[in-house]
Image (tube, rainbow, N blue to C red):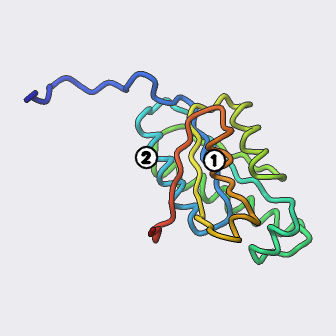
Amino acid sequence: MTQASDEPLLNAEGAPATILIAIDGSAGASRVIAAGARLARLNPVATVHVAHVFRTSRFDRARAGAPVAASGDVIDEAKEQLEAHVRSACRQCRNMVTSNFVVGDPTAEVLRLARELKVELLVVGTHDHAGFERFLLGSIAETLVRKAPCSVYVVRPTAYRE
């Protein structure tokens, strides 16, 4: 058995220096922010980017209960939500945190940001759609896990059960 040392802990080699936390407008976004902030605390000098991609698809917005035509007010509200999540991340970690608001396809835009920012860890949430809904909508998280140029940490919903 080994004993704990009195020496200060060092950051592990290979701790991510750039973390991208990709959120949507769902209630689960706060859980994704909390998970990303916990991971960022492992490397106090890491830069954290919080990104929200406003979907351009009419079907996606209608399914989510948002107006089909994206008005300036809807976009402004999405930007305000993003800034609230950035403030939350700043309260949960001491890292530098920046916001990224993008309009477009969530999968394509998150992958683009991950490449442009040279992200080493991507943190995303999942809604765990199943059956026909998953077939129809696909899984953004699953696609990101397969195509991202970095490691991906997926945050499941609180009430996830098999």
Identify the element where label 2 is drawn: helix
Indicate left or right for 57 with 117 as reference: right
Q: Nearer the viewer, residue 162 or 77?
A: 162
- Residue holding disc 2: 38
Indicate left or right for 5 with 68 as reference: left
Which part of the image, by quadrant, shows the N terminus?
top left
Residue visible at 58% across and 31% down in the picture: 120
- Residue holding disc 1: 50
Q: In this view, does 77 lie above or below 98?
A: below
Residue visible at 76% across and 66% down in the picture: 136
Q: Nearer the viewer, residue 62 or 39?
A: 62
Count of marks, rendered view: 2
Which quadrant of the structure image shows residue 76? bottom right
Q: Is residue 66 above or below residue 99?
A: below
- At label 1, the amino acid type is Val
**Residue 64 x %, y %:** 74, 73
Q: How crowded is mark 1: few (under 14 residues within 10 Å), some or many (20 or more)?
A: many
Q: How crowded is mark 2: few (under 14 residues within 10 Å), some or many (20 or more)?
A: some
Q: Which of 17 and 61 is in front in this view?
A: 61
Give me the C-alpha separation between circle 2 and circle 1: 14 Å
- At label 2, the amino acid type is Arg
Indicate left or right for 85 with 12 as reference: right
Along the polypeptide, which appears first: circle 2 or circle 1? 2
Residue visible at 78% across and 45% down in the picture: 109
